Image: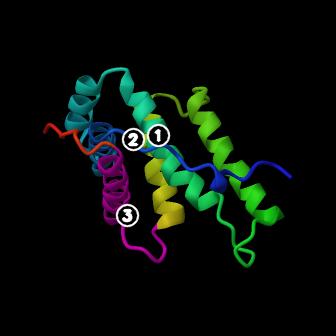
């Protein structure tokens, strides 16, 4: 059987990376191109890496769910493969390249997969950011976020 990504937890992001990545995603989702551009300029080339980190945290937990009495089944491996495929597309710049493509993919995935029972896109993105920030702060308690 293929490796199940559920068993390999993702390392926490740096708190500032969480803040910057979600600032860009939320600005892009709101159509605020000026703010998205300012965040991208400030983050520089690292924005791609930060958005890939966020994408992994958005896609993998959803697509790698073990829904067969708490045990992975063939469908959970297929779903995990879908999540890995989405990340590979982003990672290798296949038609979704650059911060805009990655942010748009995260927003669309959130809108189409995560919002049915959990609120609007903005609300879900805020919860995802809060979860990422909590994990980052627990892993890196000495880091402070700059506005």
Q: Is residue 120 visible?
A: yes
Question: Is the residue marked by circle 2 packed among few (<14), some (14-19), or many (20+) residues within 10 Å?
Answer: many
Q: Is residue 105 visible?
A: no
Q: Is residue 130 highlighted in magenta? A: yes
| 3D distance between C-alphas at marks 1 and 3 | 17 Å
Q: Is residue 133 highlighted in magenta? A: yes
Q: Secondary structure at mark 1?
A: helix
Q: Main secondary structure of the magenta part?
A: helix
Q: Secondary structure at mark 2?
A: loop
User: Contact (CB < 8 A) between labels 2 and 1?
Assistant: yes
* In the image, residue 118 above or below residue 27: below
User: Contact (CB < 8 A) between labels 2 and 3?
Assistant: no
Q: Which residue is mark 1?
A: 53
Question: Is the residue marked by circle 1 packed among few (<14), some (14-19), or many (20+) residues within 10 Å?
Answer: some
98 horizontally vs 44: left or right: right
| 3D distance between C-alphas at marks 2 and 3 | 19 Å
Where is residue 46 drawn, in percent x and y?
A: 37, 25
Specify which label sits upstream in the sequence, 2 or 3.
Answer: 2
Where is residue 143 drawn, in percent x and y?
A: 22, 38
Where is residue 130 drawn, in percent x and y?
A: 31, 58
Where is residue 83 drawn, in percent x and y?
A: 64, 49
| 3D distance between C-alphas at marks 2 and 1 | 7 Å
Nearest the viewer among 64 and 40 is 64
66 horizontally vs 132: left or right: right
Specify which label sits upstream in the sequence, 2 or 1.
Answer: 2
109 horizontally vs 76: left or right: left
* In the image, residue 114 above or below residue 51: below
Residue 124 disc label:
3
Specify which label sits upstream in the sequence, 1 or 3.
Answer: 1
* Residue ID at (32%, 65%): 123
Q: Which residues are magenta?
A: 115-139
Residue 13 disc label:
2
């Amino acid at each position: 059987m293929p490796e199940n990504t559920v068993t390999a937890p993702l390392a926490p992001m740096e708190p500032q990376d969480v803040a910057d990545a979600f600032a860009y995603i939320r600005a892009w989702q709101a159509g605020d191109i000026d703010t998205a551009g300012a965040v991208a300029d400030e983050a520089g080339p690292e924005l791609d890496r930060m958005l890939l980190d966020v994408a992994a945290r958005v896609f993998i937990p959803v697509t790698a769910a073990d829904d067969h009495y708490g045990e992975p089944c063939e469908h959970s491996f297929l779903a995990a493969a879908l999540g890995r495929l989405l990340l590979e597309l982003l990672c290798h710049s296949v038609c979704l390249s650059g911060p805009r493509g990655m942010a748009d993919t995260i927003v669309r995935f959130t809108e189409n997969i995560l919002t049915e029972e959990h609120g609007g896109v903005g609300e879900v993105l805020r919860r995802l950011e809060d979860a990422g920030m909590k994990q980052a702060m627990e892993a890196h308690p000495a880091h402070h976020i700059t506005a």
